[in-house]
Amino acid sequence: MTSAPDSVARFAPPPVLLVGNPNVGKSVIFGALTKTYVTVSNYPGTTVEITRGRARLLAGVPELIDTPGTNSLTPQSEDEQVTRDILLAEPDAIVLQVGDTKNLRRVLYLTAQLAELGRRQLLVLNLQDEARDLGVRVESGELERRLGIPVIPATATRNAGLDGIPHRLAEATQAQFDSAYPAAIERAALEVAAALPVDLGQARRGVALMLLAGDRTLAEWARGHLTEQDVDLVETRRAELERSLGCSTAVAISRARHRAVSELLRAVFHAKRSRAGSMRDRLGALSMHPVWGVPVLAGVLFVAYEVVGVFGAGTLVRLTEDGLFGKVINPAATALSQRFIPWGWLRDLLVGPYGMVTMALTYAIAIVLPVVGTFFVFFGLLEDSGYLPRLAVMVNRIFRIMGLNGKAVLPMILGLGCDTMATLTTRILPTRKERALVTFLLALGVPCSAQLGVVLAMLGSMAPLGTFIWGGVVAATLFGVGWAASRLMPGRSSDFLLEVPPIRVPSVGNILIKTAARTEWYLKEAVPLFVLGTLVLYLLDATGALPRLELFSRPLVVGLLGLPPQAADSFLVGFLRRDYGAAGFFLLRQHGQLDGLQSLVALVVITLFVPCIANVFVMIKERGFKTAAAMIAFIVPFAFAVGAVLNWVLRGVGVHL
Ligand SMILES: Nc1nc2c(ncn2[C@@H]2O[C@H](COP(=O)(O)OP(=O)(O)OP(=O)(O)O)[C@@H](O)[C@H]2O)c(=O)[nH]1
Ligand SMILES: [Mg+2]
């Protein structure tokens, strides 16, 4: 980390770190204090990286840092480690802890750890509205008196209570929290703390306890900050403690903290027991029931089909493609270029068969944008309602076949929104094997929103059997490959349960902002790739290489897959984005150049294809070049092989679609 120049450091207020359990409203509060938007969703693990912003509403406009949610400062996954690391890296920052009032036990467990690190802090008890609905009451005044730090009740989504934060920031101080550890632990902690670097200051006791608890994720930090003797000292003391305590130091520490938290809870936490479940609770339970969850899922899929497939890909695309581009933009662009542009090559580059307007923009804006736009709205509703984690719980049993359970199912479902983002969410998974497996399966067979929309629209144009076969082949491939990979890959899977948030009524504002942010992202990220792909095709065409390429790929495209030769173009641009490839097939189908069977084969291949360039980069970033390259080297030939077999079988059986 670079440090600010002295003059700035002297006057700049210390940064403020938003820390708290997952899914408690940290990002909502970040947005409220900085007036900038970061993604807010109703599932744990929305934030997996830190976001920095200027807290415009706080005195001196300090830097505000949003962190991934965590239940403990002994991290169990990469995202939790990010939070622990930033706490160590920013020793002067004030901690603005955000907690869920209903789950005060978990909140205070984290407060205990922050107190041990000697952090100056405040506590926001958020989600007061839900606590009230559940009959939970927390005496915040009494809690404040006992902890000695400002305790601010709030309902962030209604902007209630947040004005207490600027008023009380200056009162932030170290919480008084005595976990009363066994004397042997206290002695060892004192000894280890004395050996730690002085610049850790107040944090030394907390870090000593972390080291004694045997946190392996601190190994790298220890290498940079401790001498070998100190590391040996920690190991010796830890081994001695385990012998004398009869259990691991981590367990003894955690027990003592829990005892102290329970005592505090008895004084300030009141819950009425006999409250009947609300309508929302019942709906939530129904949606993850092994039997009743199935009709709920069918209902959700039906609505998805109506909204994205029929309205987005049907009605809206008709308006944009036939209407806006077909009748207005393309004819106007063609007329203008014929009038004003004397060079044929430039005219072709703009409005030819591989033209920027007639191909790149038509594909990106007229075909894909309406589809992803409607999908973003629908997916946002699912995200904010709390349905996605419930779906993950319900399908958990089937996903076990692929060696995925608990938390690992959530990123697979998020892949339906965007595979690239979902690949980043794999950071919430505890083991390396799970992270690799989910990254691989996302790249192989989870179609993202853009692609899914185009695929759905095409499937809508054939007999229902087509949808059935497409879904069946993709699912069977995913499960078959997942099953084999989970057995072949070294490492272990975890059994961490996914936490299910309450069902919440999505806020229209959040859905709109999120959709706008995602649409902007699509325009910035996807449109340039559509332009690039079109440019490649244009150049190949202009240099006469395209027909040769089509000829060269004939044995594969025409021979094995049974598709017309120009389908090769779509596969080529499919390397940049699968949805671009799918959009190519969509148009071939519209122009009657693909029959039902050919469309189905093309769709299966493009679904199993590499997702998009952005996804490939994220795969490399998260998993390393070698692993990512191996995954892609498997996926591409495999996708064509499945298509070839499907073509052969369907023709053999004589299916008509
Ligand atoms: N009813 C209610 N919902 C809230 C409140 N604060 C946040 N939410 C909702 O809680 C969910 C989680 O909010 P986020 O801000 O994404 O939570 P987070 O703590 O950043 O979550 P992670 O990044 O996953 O750790 C969203 O659906 C919010 O709309 C509140 O005070 N009341
Ligand atoms: Mg967040």
Image (spheres, rainbow, N blue to C red):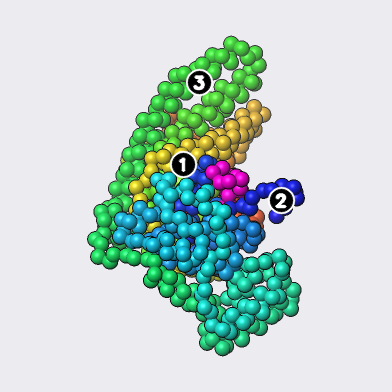
Q: Amino acid at mark 3?
A: Asn
Per the image, is 52 magenta? yes
Q: Residue at x 42, y 61 (%)?
A: 141
Nearest the viewer among 26 and 638 is 26
Q: Is residue 28 visible?
A: no
Q: Residue furthest top?
A: 339
Spatial CA span between label 2 and label 1: 38 Å
**In the depicted structure, whether residue 219 falls above or below residue 454:** below
Decide: few, some or many residues near mark 1? Use Cα within 10 Å; few <14, some 14-19, many ≥20. Answer: many
Q: Amino acid at mark 1?
A: Lys
Q: Say which residue label 2 marks.
A: 10
Element class at badge 1: helix
Q: Which mark is residue 330?
A: 3
Q: Quadrant of the rendered structure where residue 392 is?
A: bottom left
Nearest the viewer among 371 and 583 is 371
Q: Nearer the viewer, mark 3 or mark 2?
A: 2
Q: Residue at x 49, y 20 (%)?
A: 329
**In the depicted structure, whether residue 624 falls above or below residue 512:** below
Q: Ligand 1 near label 1 (Cβ, under 8 Å)?
A: no
* Horizontal relation, residue 555 to residue 42: left or right: right
The boundaries of the magenta stretch are 49-65
Element class at badge 2: helix
* Horizontal relation, residue 210 to residue 103: left or right: right
x, y (%) of residue 441? 50, 56
Q: Residue at x 49, y 40 (%)?
A: 518
Element class at badge 3: helix
Q: Residue at x 36, y 30 (%)?
A: 315
Decide: few, some or many residues near mark 2? Use Cα within 10 Å; few <14, some 14-19, many ≥20. Answer: few
Q: Amino acid at mark 2?
A: Arg
* Horizontal relation, residue 123 to residue 12: left or right: left
Nearest the viewer among 427 and 625 is 427
CB atoms at circles 3 and 2 under 8 Å apart? no
